[in-house]
Amino acid sequence: MKAIARLIQVVAKLRGPGGCPWDRKQTHRSLIKYLREETRELASALFKGNPKHMEEELGDVLLQVLLHSQLASEKGLFDFHDVARTLTKKLIRRHPHVFGGKKLRTAGQVIKQWKIIKRKEKSGVRR
Protein backbone atom coordinates (compact mmCIF):
# COMPACT_ATOMS: atom_id res chain seq x y z
CA MET A 1 0.00 0.00 0.00
CA LYS A 2 2.90 2.37 0.69
CA ALA A 3 4.20 1.85 -2.84
CA ILE A 4 0.81 2.80 -4.33
CA ALA A 5 0.49 5.86 -2.07
CA ARG A 6 3.99 6.97 -3.07
CA LEU A 7 3.22 6.41 -6.76
CA ILE A 8 0.06 8.52 -6.49
CA GLN A 9 2.14 11.29 -4.87
CA VAL A 10 4.75 11.12 -7.66
CA VAL A 11 2.10 11.41 -10.38
CA ALA A 12 0.46 14.33 -8.55
CA LYS A 13 3.84 16.07 -8.30
CA LEU A 14 4.52 15.51 -12.00
CA ARG A 15 1.18 17.22 -12.77
CA GLY A 16 1.48 19.89 -10.08
CA PRO A 17 3.09 23.34 -9.98
CA GLY A 18 6.77 23.00 -10.73
CA GLY A 19 6.16 19.53 -12.14
CA CYS A 20 7.02 18.16 -15.55
CA PRO A 21 5.94 20.40 -18.46
CA TRP A 22 4.98 17.36 -20.57
CA ASP A 23 2.87 15.77 -17.83
CA ARG A 24 1.23 19.10 -16.97
CA LYS A 25 -0.01 19.67 -20.52
CA GLN A 26 -1.62 16.24 -20.92
CA THR A 27 -5.37 15.74 -21.14
CA HIS A 28 -7.54 12.63 -21.19
CA ARG A 29 -7.69 12.96 -24.95
CA SER A 30 -3.97 13.53 -25.50
CA LEU A 31 -3.14 10.46 -23.42
CA ILE A 32 -5.28 8.06 -25.50
CA LYS A 33 -2.46 7.29 -27.94
CA TYR A 34 -0.13 6.44 -25.04
CA LEU A 35 -2.71 4.19 -23.41
CA ARG A 36 -3.10 2.31 -26.69
CA GLU A 37 0.66 2.07 -27.17
CA GLU A 38 1.32 0.86 -23.63
CA THR A 39 -1.49 -1.69 -23.88
CA ARG A 40 0.00 -3.10 -27.10
CA GLU A 41 3.43 -3.26 -25.49
CA LEU A 42 1.97 -5.07 -22.47
CA ALA A 43 0.20 -7.57 -24.73
CA SER A 44 3.49 -8.24 -26.52
CA ALA A 45 5.33 -8.73 -23.22
CA LEU A 46 2.64 -11.10 -21.97
CA PHE A 47 2.79 -13.07 -25.21
CA LYS A 48 6.58 -13.38 -24.94
CA GLY A 49 6.38 -14.32 -21.25
CA ASN A 50 9.43 -12.37 -20.08
CA PRO A 51 8.68 -11.54 -16.40
CA LYS A 52 10.86 -8.40 -16.22
CA HIS A 53 9.38 -7.02 -19.43
CA MET A 54 5.86 -7.88 -18.19
CA GLU A 55 6.56 -6.07 -14.90
CA GLU A 56 7.77 -2.95 -16.70
CA GLU A 57 4.85 -2.86 -19.15
CA LEU A 58 2.29 -3.45 -16.40
CA GLY A 59 3.80 -0.42 -14.68
CA ASP A 60 3.43 1.63 -17.84
CA VAL A 61 -0.26 0.72 -18.11
CA LEU A 62 -0.71 1.51 -14.42
CA LEU A 63 0.86 4.92 -15.05
CA GLN A 64 -1.82 5.60 -17.64
CA VAL A 65 -4.54 4.71 -15.10
CA LEU A 66 -2.90 6.97 -12.53
CA LEU A 67 -2.55 9.87 -14.95
CA HIS A 68 -6.22 9.69 -15.96
CA SER A 69 -7.21 9.41 -12.29
CA GLN A 70 -5.07 12.44 -11.43
CA LEU A 71 -6.61 14.48 -14.26
CA ALA A 72 -10.08 13.59 -12.99
CA SER A 73 -9.07 14.39 -9.41
CA GLU A 74 -7.88 17.84 -10.46
CA LYS A 75 -11.38 18.49 -11.82
CA GLY A 76 -13.03 17.15 -8.65
CA LEU A 77 -14.57 14.19 -10.50
CA PHE A 78 -12.90 11.14 -8.91
CA ASP A 79 -9.45 9.92 -7.91
CA PHE A 80 -7.48 6.67 -8.00
CA HIS A 81 -8.99 5.55 -4.69
CA ASP A 82 -12.47 5.93 -6.19
CA VAL A 83 -11.36 3.86 -9.20
CA ALA A 84 -10.06 1.14 -6.86
CA ARG A 85 -13.24 1.18 -4.74
CA THR A 86 -15.45 0.97 -7.83
CA LEU A 87 -13.43 -1.94 -9.20
CA THR A 88 -13.51 -3.75 -5.85
CA LYS A 89 -17.30 -3.45 -5.66
CA LYS A 90 -17.66 -4.65 -9.26
CA LEU A 91 -15.43 -7.68 -8.69
CA ILE A 92 -17.35 -8.69 -5.58
CA ARG A 93 -20.72 -8.13 -7.29
CA ARG A 94 -19.72 -10.12 -10.38
CA HIS A 95 -18.29 -13.02 -8.38
CA PRO A 96 -21.22 -14.20 -6.22
CA HIS A 97 -19.77 -17.71 -6.49
CA VAL A 98 -16.76 -16.48 -4.48
CA PHE A 99 -18.19 -13.73 -2.25
CA GLY A 100 -21.75 -15.01 -1.89
CA GLY A 101 -23.66 -18.23 -1.49
CA LYS A 102 -23.85 -19.20 -5.15
CA LYS A 103 -21.54 -22.03 -6.22
CA LEU A 104 -20.26 -22.45 -9.76
CA ARG A 105 -17.97 -25.28 -10.85
CA THR A 106 -16.74 -24.39 -14.31
CA ALA A 107 -15.25 -21.40 -16.07
CA GLY A 108 -18.12 -21.60 -18.56
CA GLN A 109 -20.66 -21.18 -15.74
CA VAL A 110 -18.69 -18.20 -14.44
CA ILE A 111 -18.66 -16.52 -17.87
CA LYS A 112 -22.41 -17.07 -18.27
CA GLN A 113 -23.09 -15.63 -14.78
CA TRP A 114 -20.75 -12.66 -15.46
CA LYS A 115 -22.64 -11.82 -18.65
CA ILE A 116 -26.00 -12.01 -16.88
CA ILE A 117 -24.83 -9.74 -14.06
CA LYS A 118 -23.20 -7.30 -16.49
CA ARG A 119 -26.36 -7.13 -18.61
CA LYS A 120 -28.43 -6.39 -15.48
CA GLU A 121 -25.98 -3.67 -14.43
CA LYS A 122 -26.09 -2.03 -17.85
CA SER A 123 -29.88 -2.03 -17.79
CA GLY A 124 -29.85 -0.35 -14.36
CA VAL A 125 -30.80 -3.40 -12.29
CA ARG A 126 -28.50 -3.95 -9.31
CA ARG A 127 -28.40 -7.15 -7.29
Image (cartoon, rainbow, N blue to C red):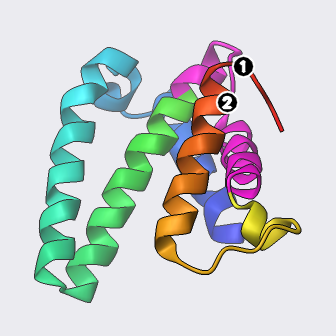
- Image location (x, y in percent) of residue 66: 51, 43
Q: Of the residues shown, which amino acid type is indicated by label 1?
A: Gly
Q: Residue at x 56, y 31 (%)?
A: 70
Does residue 121 appear left or right of residue 29 in this picture? right
Q: Residue 3 placed where, x, y %?
A: 62, 69
Secondary structure beneath dot 2 equals: helix
Q: Which mark is residue 39?
A: none
Q: Is residue 71 above or below residue 101?
A: above
**Residue 10 appears left or right of 104:** left
Q: Residue furthest top?
A: 75
Q: Is residue 28 magenta?
A: no
Quadrant position of residue 52: bottom left
Pointer 2 local density, CA inside 10 Å: few below 14, some 14–19, many at least 20: some
Query: Can residue 27 be seen here?
Result: no
Confirm or deny contact between disc 1 and disc 2 (CB under 8 A). Answer: yes
Q: Name the residue nearer the viewer: 4 or 127.
A: 127
